[in-house]
Amino acid sequence: ARPQPRPPPANSGPRLAPPGPPCSMSDPLCPPSAPFFGFMGAAAALIFANLGAAYGTAKSGVGISSMGVLKPDLVMKSIIPVIMAGVLGIYGLIIAVIIGNAVEAPAGGNMQYSLFQGFAHLSGGLACGLSGLAAGIAIGIVGDAGVRASAHQPKLYVGMVLILIFAEALGLYGLIVGLILTSKTSSCGGA
């Protein structure tokens, strides 16, 4: 006769959900997975915008350091690309905080956050984050070449700043669209 396996104790392992009634599955437009999309939007906004900011800062910083060896008096004047790249991270932070505060936990066993809101927040986060990434790449490349060139020919400085402004505008467009998309709401349960 083979021995029967012992059943596991009642409290073995971590609990993945807090005790309470399970989430209602009666509304297909408000599934329990909806907050996942909202949180992914918040993460995408912050991660991609910070990737752009980091690349723009690093690439511009290399150009400033290289130029500063020969003309150290121009370093502070050439710090503009680094500042503009840093602003891109703030754009992502703004959208991530707005989305993070808008995601609602289930209350009384019923979902409060709709799939519509989750998709709107995901698209808003991606719009802001990927626009910030593109702007950071543009700022980094222009900042690197621009500070080196303006050290040799000071008349190029104004042109470099104008190009940087238009590169920064790409991130601003993403922020504006992200704010519009994150303001979209839809309630659960017909409330």
Image (cartoon, helix red, strand yellow):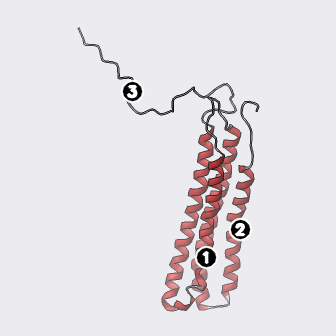
Compared with 93, 15 (above or below) is above
Work out how far the residue at label 1 is from the one at label 3, CA to CA, in angstroms: 56 Å
Within 10 Å of the Cα at label 2, are there few (<14), some (14-19), or many (20+) other Cα atoms? some
Residue drawn at x 71%, y 50% is 182
Q: Which of label 1 and label 3 is nearer to you? A: 3
Mark 3 and mark 2 lie on one chain; the one further toward the N terminus is 3
- Image quarter where the C terminus lies is top right
Residue 133's disc is none
The secondary element bearing badge 3 is classed as loop
* Residue under label 3: 11
Mark 1 and mark 3 lie on one chain; the one further toward the N terminus is 3
Q: Which kind of residue does numbered mark 3 sit on?
A: Asn
- Image quarter where the N terminus lies is top left
- The spot of residue 23 in percent (x, y) is 60, 29
* Residue under label 1: 81
- The spot of residue 115 in percent (x, y) is 68, 38
* Residue under label 2: 169
The secondary element bearing badge 1 is classed as helix
Work out how far the residue at label 2 is from the one at label 1, CA to CA, in angstroms: 13 Å
Along the line of sight, the residue nearer the viewer: 65 or 79: 79
Residue drawn at x 56%, y 62% is 50
Work out how far the residue at label 3 is from the one at label 2, CA to CA, in angstroms: 55 Å
Picture quarter containing residue 134?
bottom right
